[in-house]
Amino acid sequence: GIQVEQSPPDLILQEGANSTLRCNFSDSVNNLQWFHQNPWGQLINLFYIPSGTKQNGRLSATTVATERYSLLYISSSQTTDSGVYFCAVATAGNNRKLIWGLGTSLAVNP
Amino acid sequence: NAGVTQTPKFQVLKTGQSMTLQCAQDMNHEYMSWYRQDPGMGLRLIHYSVGAGITDQGEVPNGYNVSRSTTEDFPLRLLSAAPSQTSVYFCASSSGGLYGYTFGSGTRLTVV
């Protein structure tokens, strides 16, 4: 089945710094999403981005489907950005069966 | 408040016991799904449903049953709990299954 690799596994930032999280996947996808899990365990959908670029405030994401990767950019990080960021993908064969990466654990220090 | 409601939040079971994790959504979403999350891992799909009366298996369906008799409810049944089913369980819903997932707050299950 499709493999999803996220990097880096862990990241520590000072408040105000920028960061880039990467998601590589091993097959063509037509569903790719980024999620944030906060330190209390709540999961929030950030982006649906099987291709192209989207922005939402300080967060933006770019997926280059032909090269099988996606990037999540966090600018001017805040302590509330702490948590784990997950990338999840699905193939055209069943685009509702999301396969998740192991996540990037982000800690933003004041 | 609109959203996905999971109950209970915490549960301890003995090996061999059965139980049902409840999931309800009030957003009229067609798509609902159950995931489990184990330490240091991403979520793994257990079962999902694209509408009332329709369910399908995910990555790790063994030991779990589901049914979808209404649009709102999608219960997950453990027929005979095993220690390997100790995990945090999340229910999610979406209007089309492609994006805009809304997650419940999770159920932390321990099987002893």
Image (tube, coloured by chain):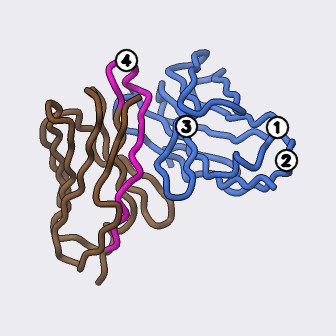
Chain colours: A brown, B blue
Please state which amino acid type lies under the numbered disc 4.
Answer: Gly
Between the C-alphas of marks 2 and 4, the distance is 37 Å
Residue A107 in the image: x percent, y percent? 34, 72
Is residue A52 rendered to the left or right of residue B41? Answer: left
Chain letter for mark 2: B
- Say above or below: B60 vs A12: above
In the image: residue A74, left or right of residue B63: left
Binning the other alpha carbons within 10 Å of mark 1 as few (below 14), some (14 to 19) or many (20 upward) gives some
* Element assignment for label 2: loop
Residue type at tag 2: Thr
The residue segment tinted magenta is A90-107
Magenta-span inclusion, residue A103: yes
Circle 3: residue type: Gln
Quarter of the rendering containing residue A80: bottom left
Q: Chain of mark 3?
A: B
Mark 1 sits on what residue?
A: B80
Q: Nearer the viewer, residue A39 or B82?
A: B82
Disc 2 with disc 4 on a shared chain: no
How far is disc 3 from disc 4 in space, using C-alphas?
27 Å
Chain identifier of the residue bearing label 4 in the image: A
Q: Which residue is mark 4?
A: A93
Measured in 3D between alpha carbons, the distance from the residue under mark 1 to the one under mark 2, in whole angstroms, is 7 Å
Mark 2 crowd level (few <14, some 14–19, many ≥20, 10 Å Cα): some
Q: Residues within 10 Å of mark 4 (few under 14, many from 20)?
A: few
Residue A24 image point, x, y percent: 26, 43
